[in-house]
Image (cartoon, rainbow, N blue to C red):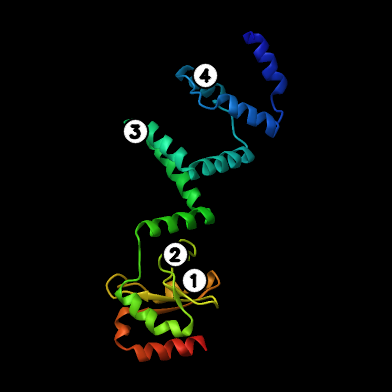
Amino acid sequence: MSQEARRKVGDAHRGKPLSNAHCEKLSLSHKGKRLSSETRRKMSVVRTGQKRTEETKKRQSEAAIQKYKNLEARQKIAAALMGHSVTDAFKKRMSEAIKALWQDADYSNKQSKAIIAGSAKRPNKAELALLKIISPFGFCYVGDGELIIKRKNPDFVDNKNRLIELFGDYWHAGQSPDDRIDFFRKEGWECLVIWESELKFPDKIKERVGLWTC
């Protein structure tokens, strides 16, 4: 097809939305093909000055998020970038895309679970000691990633939307239990925070949990 014929076809279809079937055919026809530097340059020149509609931006953003969710796609991107210098503009776009991706609740929860599962987290000595005290009240351990709430993994849960968090005297030093309690309350959960130092007084913990759950 001559350049003039292609131009006429392009003009005839300009502004018309493509059907899903046609988009799929185009995608399949281009699968595995890489655009030459000259083709990419021409496409860039053609698009210069064109403003994307909000709908187009939204579709492209959603497509990028879905693509980045795919492990194979991420590996291909990493392999393609290996050994190449990355511009600040590209870094910024990637950072924005990843931030948008983590705003997706399903994705962030799945990734959080995978990270915790990869660390092979198991109840430590303090958590086992607390579990022995609170299990009669219906609480079970979920600190291994079994339960994720807005990227946070609580330690213990019962069947009445109640959580118990064990704060380590070292790891949580300076943190306010009220912040954790308020966070979970906004998500529809009641939370009780117990400090590691309180484990020396199991009877007091039993009394406290009993009053809280009654």
The three-letter amino acid code for the residue at tag 2 is Lys
Mark 4 or mark 2, whichever is nearer to me: 2
Residue named by callout 4: 42
Q: How many marks?
A: 4
What secondary structure is marked by label 1? Answer: helix
Query: Which disc, if any, is residue 152?
Result: 2
Mark 4 or 1, nearer chain start: 4
Tell which tag, 4 or 1, sits nearer the viewer: 1
CB within 8 Å, label 3 to label 1: no
- The image quadrant where one finds the N terminus is top right
Q: Residue at x 72, y 20 (%)?
A: 12
Mark found first going from the N terminus, 4 or 3:
4
Q: Amino acid at mark 1?
A: Phe
- Ranked by sequence position, the earlier of labels 3 and 2 is 3
What is the secondary structure assignment of the residue under circle 4? helix
Vertical arrangement, residue 92 with respect to residue 9, above or below: below
Say which residue label 1 marks.
184
Q: Residues within 10 Å of mark 2 (few under 14, many from 20)?
A: some
- Residue 52: x, y in percent? 60, 34
